[in-house]
Amino acid sequence: MAKAIGKVALLWRGDRQARDAATHEASRFQRVFEALARRNILAEPAVYADEMADEVRTQLLRVDGVLVWVDPISNGQTRAALDPMLREVARRGVWVSAHPDVIMKMGVKEVLYRTRNLGWGTDTHVYRSNTSFREEFPHRLREGGPRVLKRNRGNGGQGVWKVELLSESPAGPHLQVLEARRGSFPENMALDGFMARFDEYFQNDGCVIDQPFQPRLPDGMTRCYMSGDKVVGFGHQFIKALITPPPGSPDAAMQPGPRIMHLASALQFQRLRTLMESDWTPRLIETLQIEGQSLPIIWDADFLYGPPTAAGEDTYVLCEINVSSVFPVPDQALDEMAKLVETRLTRQRGLETGRAAT
């Protein structure tokens, strides 16, 4: 049997019972474990909870790398304790994907503003304080039609709102608002009351991103799966988030359709693949000042359809980039992920050998 090239831990959130019972076979990441094994990479589960942080830290310091799947917000839990611990183990020589510093550049909504000129952008603005939000947003809402507001960190549609002006009155504008969180219904309310909900979004140096609502949202969303700087698959889904349901719609009618996975070579996505690999990702790296070797093992970019070109070609508008917890992924992506893990471990081993020699 060939010698293992390294050992990695797969980290996801759970409780003490889940940590004690974790196995390769019983994990939702079973296929990831199998793909790593085919590359001669040892892998072990590392179930995490804040109260077990010291125990998990000790475990991570015994491996060469850690692959992390933890959402920024989940059932009231955040990454406030996890991220400093991951930074610490990274400083001590453990390779971390995705590193929290990379997440804070790529995996937050502010990336929509910072990369608005890459070719996937639109009329995008950022509010860095409650004061600027209250001063600037009402004018944009009056002048630009329906808008979409997004808190900087979140997942599952939390803090993402479609806002539409219904009427003006002496008491102020009246709105219809709809959150992207599954199961949300439209609400009619005054502008001042709605903006008050955003106070918490600006805490801890938070910000809010403002974009125009995309009329082609009913055409669905295309998820471009990336491993490093390489496209490893696509997923297309007809979503219901931010689409106002007809009156009396049953809950089932508000559920998104299934995400249909496609190979990276699928013909209908080749223009998007070329844009991602040859143009947008290299410019993303340059704009965000990220080292190419720091790109996550798995991440994705979600695109909505923009207005067609004069030639009838589709255009794409970036909706968000997901970095913290991208799963499930297309089958093809698993081997590409494992191949990149092998490359990163080999590179890390070479760097360590070089440091030892000097």
Image: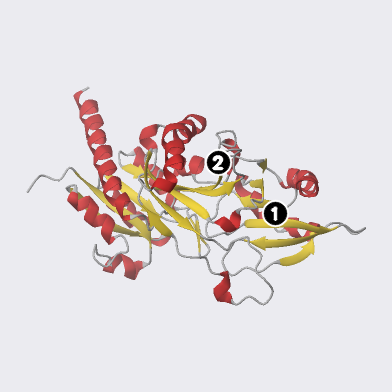
Q: Which residue is mark 2?
A: 111
Q: Secondary structure at mark 1?
A: helix
Mark 2 is surrounded, within 10 Å at the Cα level, by few (under 14), some (14 to 19) or many (20 or more) other residues, namely many
Q: Residue furthest right?
A: 170
Q: Residue furthest front?
A: 311
Specify the quadrant of the image occupied by residue 65.
top left
- 250 on left or right of 40: right
Colour scheme used in the picture? secondary structure
State the mark number for residue 199: 1
Viewer-proximal residue, 44 or 310?
Answer: 310
Q: Amino acid at mark 2?
A: Val
Q: Is residue 90 visible?
A: yes
Viewer-proximal residue, 76 or 345?
Answer: 345
Image quadrant containing the C terminus: top left
First of labels 1, 2 by sequence position: 2
Q: Position of residue 324 (x, y in %)?
A: 44, 51
- 214 on left or right of 286: right
Q: Amino acid at mark 1?
A: Asp
Q: Position of residue 349 (x, y in %)?
A: 22, 35
Specify the quadrant of the image occupied by residue 5.
top left
- 103 on left or right of 133: left
Q: Measure the C-alpha gap from mark 1 to mark 2.
A: 21 Å
